[in-house]
Image: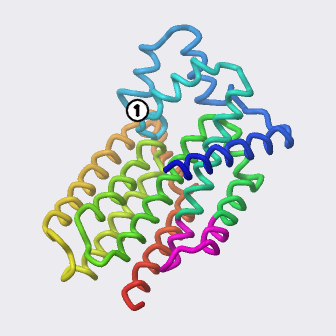
Amino acid sequence: LGMYLVALFAMTAAFFALYLVLGVHPNILRAESGLMLELSDSGRYRDFVQHFIVRDHNGHYTPIAFWFEYQQIGLFRMNETAWLIRNALVSAILAGSIATFFTNLWATRSAWSWIVGISVGLVVVCQPAMTELLNWPFMALQGMCMSVGYLAAAALLRTSRTERLTWAGIAVPLALGYGSMHFFGAGLPISLGVIAAAVALLWLRRTEADRLWVSIGLIGFALIVTIGHAWFMLQSETERAAGGLDILVAVQRIGTLTSEMLRAATVGMLSSQYQ
């Protein structure tokens, strides 16, 4: 754990230095970020709760993440340095989660697999489109959603290679998959994809599974809470008035990346059965 924390600190410092060199300026007043700052400055906490906690906001039902975002905005306000550090931390977490996923694609982890994983993570996070995305503080939630999704896929790969399939090995990726929905609306395809991959894994290794019915129950529970969460996401009055669901736009933003991530995870699981 200590090694991972040191690596996270080092990567955060590196991203912060990179953003300073590139002259990145966080777009603090953009859309939801600006609205939360306005609500915080005017002391309208009840309005914040009404818009972001008790119901969905533009197809995103993430009350816990919204609450933490509101607290950070009240603390950082217009301090660009604080926001750059926060964005650098999110970038480091995203790069680390991508590295973890790609490292777990190998049947046996080595220094070479970590080098490849870290390189891929840095290439993804350092591209201009990602830098622009994280330049808006509110979009850090999407970065965290993607991070949790990659960790869920990595957990599936690790579970697929254990000698005996346990209910705990199934529970971890399911929890991570559903957890992605608490950061961004696009966590829906991640959670559903993890559930589908868990079903495939359990079917392939059903004769080796420990407490099979417990694992089946966990998958069923994950499906129920995912569908229930999705129902809250689709209740936006703005979306109903417009006759469409903005959540589809959010899903498209991350859908391709998620499908490729889970496809690779499934291929890795299947290939591990024949090694």
Residue reaching furthest to the front: 2
Q: Say above or below: 249 vs 265.
A: above
Q: Residue at x 68, y 27 (%)?
A: 82
Q: Say above or below: 2 vs 101.
A: above
Q: Nearer the viewer, residue 261 or 114?
A: 114
Q: Is residue 95 left or right of residue 21?
A: left
Is residue 85 a member of the stretch shown in magenta? no
Residue 14 x, y percent position in the rendering: 74, 46
Q: Say above or below: 135 vs 149.
A: above
Q: Residue at x 55, y 14 (%)?
A: 40
Disc 1 marks which residue? Answer: 63
Is residue 116 a member of the stretch shown in magenta? yes
Query: Which quadrant of the view contains residue 157?
Result: bottom left
Query: Which quadrant of the view contains residue 229?
Result: top left
Q: Which residues are magenta?
A: 101-117
Q: Nearer the viewer, residue 57 or 160?
A: 160
Q: Residue at x 56, y 8 (%)?
A: 42
Residue 176 x, y percent position in the rendering: 39, 53
Q: Say above or below: 231 vs 166.
A: above
Q: Is residue 116 left or right of residue 57?
A: right
Residue reaching furthest to the top: 42
Q: Badge 1: how crowded within 10 Å, few (<14), some, or many (20+)? A: some
